[in-house]
Amino acid sequence: MLNYVLSFLAFAMMSTLSFAEANKLPAKYENLFTAIDHLSVDFSQSSYKKLRNRTTVRAGNAQFSKPSMFRWNFIAESGAVEEYYYNGEKLTHFREKEKLVNHYNTNAGLAKELTEVVNLVLDPKILLSVYKIKESKTTNGKTQVIFVPNVPDNTDVESIFVTVQDSKKFVEEVQIFYRDGNNTKFAFKNPTYSTNDKNIFTFSRTGNFTVRHHG
């Protein structure tokens, strides 16, 4: 479900550019992109597949905390529940319909990639390590910044739209457009910034599940 998002993140992780080597954020946006330590949100995810001319929509809620801890609770249109937990040591993927629990260690590629999604929401400046600002505009209290790859030939990503709610300095939407015509959008709302209990980032459901461990 996050295939295209993950391909974008894999590219970001392979980059050898440091923040200092990348383009600097214009001064007027320095205060707009603010780092956040803890965040809880409601979200929706829509993924458009050009080949099928179909958009899949899911929604749920999520909790993010630095350093790199997260919990995504997805609910599909069918009502199926899918969850991702990462407590800094172990990534767990739970699929309620299949009663399946997959555990991954911290070195697994999936763990690293999902961590980058959280980093992007908590600190949008991370994009500047591999992307440059193409344009930006501010309307109705929201600023949208369009990022394009520094090295287009190294990625399938065509552009990334990031929308920030100016008053709360909160990333309200991230949309990733791909060269093949597909796109994925995350929309976030109802943010709260209180400290998250670390226990919520560890899988704790009980039941008769099939459990698999991956290196």
Image (cartoon, grey):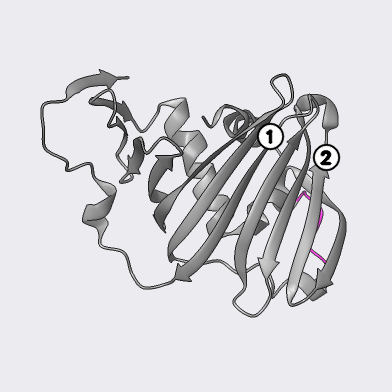
- The residue that mark 2 highlights is 150
Query: Extreme front residue here?
Result: 78
Q: Residues within 10 Å of mark 2 (few under 14, many from 20)?
A: some
> Horizontally, is 37 left or right of 89 in the view?
right
Say which mark, if any, is on residue 212: none
**Residue 81 visible in image:** yes
Say if 73 sits above or below 138 in the image.
above
**Residue 102, image quadrant:** top left
Q: Which residues are magenta?
A: 21-26
Q: State the image coordinates of residue 164 (x, y, percent, origin top left).
A: 68, 66
Mainly helix, strand or loop, the magenta region? Answer: loop
Q: How many marks?
A: 2
**Residue 9, image quadrant:** top right
Q: Are marks 1 and 2 in contact (CB under 8 Å)?
A: yes
Which residue occupies 25% across, 62% down?
A: 197
SS under mark 1? loop
Say which mark, if any, is on residue 15: 1
Q: Quadrant of the C terminus?
A: top left
Say if 39 sits above or below 130 in the image.
below
Q: State the image coordinates of residue 147 (x, y, percent, origin top left).
A: 79, 49
Say if 29 sits above or below 42 in the image.
below
**Residue 105, image quadrant:** top left
Residue 105 belongs to the span the image colors magenta:
no
Kind of residue sitting beneath label 1? Ser
> Horizontally, is 209 left or right of 173 in the view?
left
Which residue occupies 81% across, 75% down?
A: 28
Kind of residue sitting beneath label 2? Asn
SS under mark 2? loop
> Horizontally, is 205 left or right of 90 in the view?
left
Labels 1 and 2: the sequence-earlier one: 1
Which residue occupies 55% across, 58% down?
A: 188
